Image: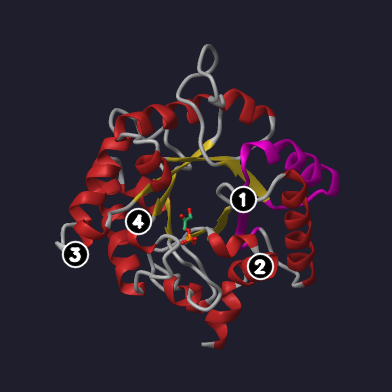
Amino acid sequence: MTSKTDGNFDRTPLIAGNWKMNMDHAQGIALLQKLAWTLKDAKHDFQRVEVAVFPPFTDLRSVQSLVEGDGLQIVYGAQDLSDQDSGAYTGDISGEFLAKLDCTYALVGHSERRTVHHESDEQCRDKIRAAIRHKLTPMLCIGEGLDERQSGNHVTFTLEQLRGSLADLNEKELEGLVVAYEPVWAIGTGEVAGPEDAQEMAAAIREELGKLYSEDFAQATRILYGGSVKSSNVANILGGSDVDGALVGGASLDAEEFAKIARFEQHLLSN
Ligand SMILES: O=C(CO)COP(=O)(O)O
């Protein structure tokens, strides 16, 4: 086991920006351009720390053109996908369309989908299946609400979501899976789980993946933390040996701030 402070990572860290329902396609392009310039100026090594953005569906074609046209190393994904591939599903978006737009990732089961759209673990599992069918890497989001946290039931609750969302899926299909632990009470609230909380849950998730699958799979799977991540707290949060990156909401809408988050190693080194 290596530690992050000696300059080695067990897994390639991933810093991901979920734009949620912000940024139309023109704004999205401006944001992505600025992010790319800022990271280029900082000589960011994308092989060392991967950077991804999750724009709204309507931005994805423009994002694809910019990334391809300018040869950017930033990757991108969708905030959701349908569990179906085509047909009479008004308003839904097929993984097939997302694959055509060269998306790398698809978020599944973000807490805002689970709460606002009442998505169940079973639906999440079907969406993961759909992502896999179209060679999109699923980023499964799980995490407890305030009640579970206050009652001390947060680990049990979150691991149940994990098991429910992965039920019947095998290790081979899930290769590359990313899990994002996002405690609902810390999303958009300014409340951030402490580094110990993030590490506690990431370790519990990894242990559970080891039980469900193999130790190799558990060790290879990246586990991110999300919830009020900023440049001022990212280094602490990523200090935990099982926390492999961040899924960032609000702070990803500011190119300079998000670039600073992606450059978290600079903060680690200066600590
Ligand atoms: O939900 C999140 C990312 O998916 C977190 O959002 P905030 O960073 O705005 O709290």
* Residue 187: quadrant of the picture: bottom left
Q: Nearer the viewer, residue 70 or 212?
A: 70
* Residue 7: quadrant of the picture: bottom right
Label placed on residue 22: 1
Q: Which residue is mark 4?
A: 184
Q: Which residue is mark 2?
A: 259
Q: Residue at x 37, y 63 (%)?
A: 186
Q: Nearer the viewer, residue 99 or 240?
A: 99
Q: Which residue is mark 3?
A: 150
User: Is residue 98 highlighted in magenta?
Assistant: no
Disc 2/disc 1 C-alpha distance (Å) = 18 Å
* Mark 2 or mark 4, whichever is nearer to me: 4
Tag 3, which secondary structure?
helix
Looking at this view, name the residue that lies furthest to the top. 87
Disc 2/disc 3 C-alpha distance (Å) = 33 Å
Q: The residue under label 3 is which amino acid type?
A: Gln
In the rendered image, the vertical position of residue 185 relative to residue 218, given as above or below: below
- At label 1, counting other C-alpha atoms closer than 10 Å, the crowd grade (few under 14, some 14-19, many 20 or more) is few
Q: The residue under label 4 is which amino acid type?
A: Val
The part of the chain drawn in magenta is 47-74
